[in-house]
Amino acid sequence: MQSTENEAKSTDKNLEAMRQFSEQYAKRTGTYFCVDPSVTAVVIEGLAKHKDDLGSPLCPCRHYEDKEAEVNAAFWNCPCVPMRERKECHCMLFLTADNDFAGDKQEISLEEIKAVRDSMG
């Protein structure tokens, strides 16, 4: 399925890398993915796309005037400073158990991420 629309999607390599990172980080920090798996899928896709384009998983849920400068500053590279310091994830990727939107999962399949991505295509 090689088409021009692939340019808007992340590479499978970085998508899988960000999926594995997200699962491992959630387990290590005792956080959970959003009860709505499409939120998790969209955020992981965004992280992978930034890794493709910028070389770092810059938070995909914020607006930046200069993405390259933000990558170099490293504050918003996932896991961002607010997440590392206070377990505050603006993207709702990593949620503490007491968060109303937290599900009970710390895993998501590559197929599930791709299904959400393709449905939004």
Image (cartoon, rainbow, N blue to C red):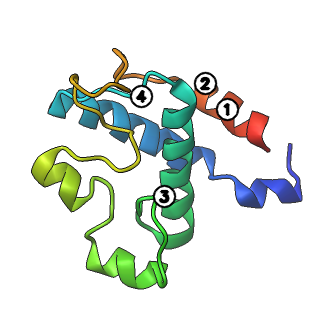
The residue wearing badge 2 is 112
Mark 4: amino acid: Cys
Report the residue marked by disc 4: 34
Q: Amino acid at mark 2?
A: Glu
What label sits on residue 43 in the rendered view?
A: none
Query: Along the horizontal axis of the image, is 22 left or right of 83?
Result: right
Q: Secondary structure at mark 2?
A: helix
User: Which callout, 2 or 4, points to the residue nearer the camera?
Assistant: 4
Instruction: Give the CA separation, mark 1 to mark 2.
Output: 6 Å
User: Mark 1–mark 3 contact, CB under 8 Å?
Assistant: no
| Residue beneath disc 1 | 116
Query: In percent of the image, x 35 and y 50: which residue is there?
Result: 90
Residue 88 or residue 52, whichever sits in front: 88
Disc 4 to disc 3, C-alpha distance:
16 Å
Cβ–Cβ below 8 Å for labels 1 and 2? yes
Evaluate whether residue 110 shows in this view. no
Mark 1 or 4, nearer chain start: 4
N-terminal label among 1 and 3: 3
Task: Pick whichever of labels 4 and 3 is earlier in the sequence.
Answer: 4
